[in-house]
Image (cartoon, rainbow, N blue to C red):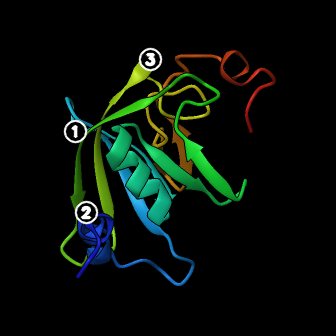
Amino acid sequence: MATRQAVQDGWLEAVRWNEAGLVPAIAQDAASGRVLMVAWMNRDALAETVATGRAVYWSRSRGRLWRKGEESGNVQRVREVRLDCDGDVILLQVEQAGGVACHTGRESCFYRVLRDGHWETVEPVLRDPAEMYGGGAS
């Protein structure tokens, strides 16, 4: 007989994790539909996200779970979690605290547009990264 926890976590089995045990996750503003950012999730990050209603990602650079907003205060409250048709991409519809999702202080990480063969910044900085991280961001 399956344990209660195994039954509760059965939905995680539908996710097609890559060879590193990760799946890309798109954070989309639940109200506007705007794509805010893309990050990675492992099994623990996705399970915690669903359990708490707060976006949690896997930071490849830090090698640990990253609870969005833990340093900056720019928490993402998850309103809905979707899985794509192939089972290999997660879509989080979120409410973005402070209106800033990007570590550069912008609403979205997608603030550059390709124009005439070069990347042009088209979004303003809404919050100084030094305010969010105490020493600036790269």
For marks 3 and 2 on the same chain, the one whose residue lies earlier in the sequence: 2
Q: Is residue 103 above or below residue 98?
A: below
Identify the residue at image location x=57%, y=16%.
127
Count how many numbered circles sit on residues in the image. Answer: 3
- Which residue corresponds to mark 2? 8
Query: In terms of secondary structure, where does tag 2 sit?
Result: helix
Q: Is residue 128 above or below residue 28?
A: above
Residue furthest toward the right? 135
Front in this rendered view, residue 82 or 38: 82
- The quarter of the rendered structure image containing the C terminus is top right
Label 3: how many Cα within 10 Å (few below 14, some 14–19, many 20+):
some
Identify the residue at image location x=44%, y=17%.
98
Disc 1 to disc 2: CB gap under 8 Å? no
- Which residue corresponds to mark 3? 98
Q: Is residue 126 left or right of residue 5?
A: right
Q: Position of residue 137 (x, y in %)?
A: 73, 33
| Three-letter amino acid code at the position of disc 1 | Gly
Q: Is residue 79 above or below residue 91?
A: above
- The quarter of the rendered structure image containing the N terminus is bottom left
Question: Mark 3 to mark 1: distance in Å?
Answer: 17 Å
